[in-house]
Amino acid sequence: MSESKKPSLDDWKAATEKGLKGKPASSLEWSTPDGITIKTVYTKADVENLRSQDTLPGFAPYLRGPHTTMYAGRPWTIRQYAGFSTAEESNAFYRRTLAGGGQGVSVAFDLATHRGYDSDHPRVVGDVGKAGVAIDSVEDTKVLFDSIPLGTISVSMTMNGAVLPVLASYVIAAEEQGVPQDQLRGTIQNDILKEFMVRNTFIYPPTPSMRIVGDIIEYASKHMPLFNTISISGYHMQEAGADASLELAYTLADGKDYVKTAVERGMGVDDFAGRLSFFFAIGMNFYLEIAKLRAARMLWCEIMEDFGAKKASSKMLRTHCQTSGWSLTFQDPYNNVMRTTIEAMAAVFGGTQSLHTNALDEAIALPTDFSARIARNTQLVLQEEAHITHVADPWGGSYMMESLTQQIADKAREVMKEVDQAGGMVKAIEAGLPQRRIEEASARRQANIDRGLETIVGVNKYKPKDEKAIDAFKVDNKAVRLSQIDRINKVKASRDQSKVNACLEALTQAAASGKGNLLELSINAMRVRCTLGEVTQAMEKIFGRHTPHTSTVSGVYGKVWADDPQWLDLKKDVDAFAAKEGRRPRMLVVKMGQDGHDRGAKVIASAFADAGFDVDLAPLFQTPEEVAEQAVENDVHVVGVSTLAGAHNTLIPQLIQELKKKNAEDVVVVCGGVIPQQDYEELRAAGVADIFGPGTSVAVSARRVIQRISGQI
Amino acid sequence: MPRFDTDTYVQGVLNGDRRMIAKTITLIESTLHRDEEQTQDIIGQLLPHCGKSIRVGVTGPPGAGKSTFIEALGLHLLENKRRVAVLAVDPSSKLSGGSVLGDKTRMGRLMANNDIFIRPSAAGETLGGVARKTRETLLVLEAAGFDTVLVETVGVGQSETVVADMTDFFLLVALPNAGDELQGIKRGIMEMADAVVVNKADGPFEDSAKQAAHVLRSALQLMHHPRPDWDLPVLLISARTGLGIDEVWKAILRFQGAMTANGVLQARRREQNLEWMTALVREELSRQFDTHSEVRYLLPELRRKVSDGRMTAVRAASMLMQAFSVGQTT
């Protein structure tokens, strides 16, 4: 071969365009939902002048990882989040997990616990034991951690709203195991800001909630030095529809506000910053997710240097990751194993410190033993068979990856600047800014998927001919509730009521005066067997319960569909209905019970309105009776129930009964969301007119609703 | 939707049957001509039972917290043993015709109480339609025994004039910021207001709310016509903490007392009845115009000509009116 001139990018372009028959090479580029262009080929020119290039793992700005040797020294922690309905079942699961190679345990709580209600509260009849374990008092927590040495096993608790009584009950359970507070290791999520943004499992308004965060950071920095007091979470933002740069920016901005809160109380940054950890979602956007984690570390280091942090541990972002639950599909569910594997690889290439891999049936119900084992083994195979762990930051130096890392960091900086201009995250949230951005991203993405512009295998492409339902874990919610109530009664009968009263009174006083540490007082209260509901109530008297202000975007969903014949037909049907009936079809979209995941409900509300419906969006956390009353007052044609947390078997039949009581049998009830196939028959028998599984596009479901309410089917 | 005979609607409303109240409102909202005719019969029979409530209009720029204010006021009124009805008019999307009726979503604490009835309505296409429908709905709720009716409207466009024309007391909710050219609140709305409340006077906004109230007070002194027996109050409130809500309600009662004593309230309602009549005539004329066969025949062609500049608007309008009047006499 002769020594010819080295081919240039122009040569590449010419050669490429020859193969493209006249189309420009740029026609192969792809734009991510964030608006970042993914090019076909990257060159040295893409990484020239990048500031953080050519750094090393374990050194600032930590772009390449917080530790020098990364997984070559010690692999990431396999941490499987699990919650069964009862403390006994969860405990048995933890023991099996630890015996099978798991290295820490994660606790999922039921929605009643999240929202600070004891299991005997009338508002939570459908929620107890669903989607996690119910904790009413220390007695439940003790059962939960029975024979699990809390001095050595790290515990991760997904708790934000009822963070005080739950954390306190963990401290007491350990104390009664003989483990002192300074040996406790683990993490509590305690990230209340994102709850106001996306997940809605808060209790108190933002200001007192931030005081609670501050109290916990302060208490733990003195008494629980090994415990991570806060896990700043972007996970739920991605689950709610945020793209990668929004997730990254809002998470870091939340982190900034927490640091500010602690600093304003007079704490030194280096006294607590090392105990802050992060939590990101890893979805199917493979390259970008890796870049996101690298960029996150670089940006956090900058932020902490601005706060004047000196210690290395204050400046290095350490994170837990979980594969995306939203990317899991209900249809053809075994595909979820592959999705989770790909996402897990992205998390590992991005340099996560711990990882939860979702079980294949997690989109439908709590994992079964079988699906949980596959999920855990996915990580073991990555760790022990694939030889991935030998190299720290294996993507370092890749033209593409370094360039992407820089681009997503720049995007995130722009969004954070917008937050700064709004006066910080608390104010931005109060003004509804991040909520609106996330909702827009979510509606756009859903419309793209529904229309088939984004492929989901088995859902909108390559659909299986006949679907075989998989066995889903089913919770006998009534039995769980009764046994919890029984335990509450026993606790209340055997405790010293005067001590209980004194502890609760002290909490109320501290809430009112602003003096005293609420975590310390909650620990005292849980020790004398106050219940979670009582502790919550004691502060609620002063703080009040926060009511969210729901808003919806409009026009985003309809815009993606604008010229689709299916959509135009639907709009014709809606107009025809309105002309005949004298008004537009009117639908009440509701979520019942304590489940605050309202992404689905909001997308549905906004998409149906774009199709020409008049849509009433019910407030969150309603009981079936309240929903029936609203359906009657607003005289809607149809109630659409969105359900994710498994309370449908209890709440939907109740709703239909309540409608009957009010003579409102003419109101049609349909439901959608995560409903296992095995429940369909029960729901239909109860009077549900139609059930829309995940993946049903609004073009289809709205059409069926029109037919139902005009009596055509 | 099932429909009932006039007597069923009337008796249902008078008995306070919540489902029949709702169904009657639906009938009022219907765009079908036969429903409109039945509605007039029903309203005719309900009218003798109306007029006993205090009617409060609430407006303000988007984001001022109208819904949360109404929620807080509603809770306060319930404590005072009042029976409260809330009408919320939501703008419909011009593009799709559909809408998300979100006001009630923001009044979660008012739900599930027999002494309160909240009905959000889509504004629909025409403003005249909003006026008639809201007024008639208000009458239905009065006949059903609600003694306080709150009508919420978004403070953009013309709908606030419409609401001011059917209420006894018109209240403007303002944001806690002083600048921005008085928040883009139109002078006309300022002049209509019987009270102004500055919301969100709590926490971080307390200072700016105070300042906003100060600016509003001086602006109002300049532009507001003095009224007999009434100094227009500018009140600081927080819908979140409940601060100032009691003062707002006291101001409304004081206004009602004073204006009843001096006859202004009665005069206002008489005036509004005349407005109502005029509005009904205009709406009916407009409907007849829109459905007139000759007009419908001519309209597309004339629109094209005017739009292409081949005919003046004045000429086209005159041709349409001529066609309409000719059709009338035949």
Image (cartoon, coloured by chain):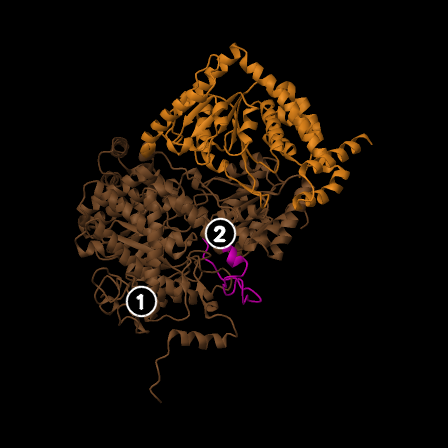
Q: Quadrant of the C terminus of chain B?
A: top right
**Chain A on-screen colour:** brown
Q: Which residue is mark 2?
A: A443
A395 left or right, relative to B164: left
Residue type, numbered disc 1: Val
The stretch in magenta equals A446-475
**Coordinates of residue B68 in the picture (x, y in percent):** 44, 32
Question: Which of B51 and B176 lies nearest the eye of the viewer?
Answer: B176
Quick one: label 1 or label 2, which is nearer the N terminus?
1
Q: Residue at x 42, y 21 (%)?
A: B222
- The residue labelled by disc 1 is A47
Q: Position of residue A212 (x, y in %)?
A: 28, 40
Give the left or right position of residue A444, taking residue A418 as reference. right
Principal secondary structure, stretch drawn in magenta: loop
A11 to A134, vertically: above or below: below
Name which quarter of the figure residue A539 lies in: top left
Q: Colour of chain B?
A: orange
Q: Does any portion of residue A310 appear in the rendered image?
A: yes
Q: Which quadrant does the N terminus of chain B fall into?
A: top right
Residue type of the residue flagged with mark 2: Ala
Whether residue A236 appears in magenta in the rendering, the answer is no
Q: x and y percent of residue A596 in the render?
A: 43, 45
Against B108, residue A245 (above or below) is below
Chain hosting mark 2? A
Q: Which residue is outermost to the top? A: B261
Q: Is disc 2 placed on a helix, strand or loop?
A: helix
Chain of the residue that carries numbered disc 1 in the rendered image: A
Frontmost residue, A666 versus A135: A666
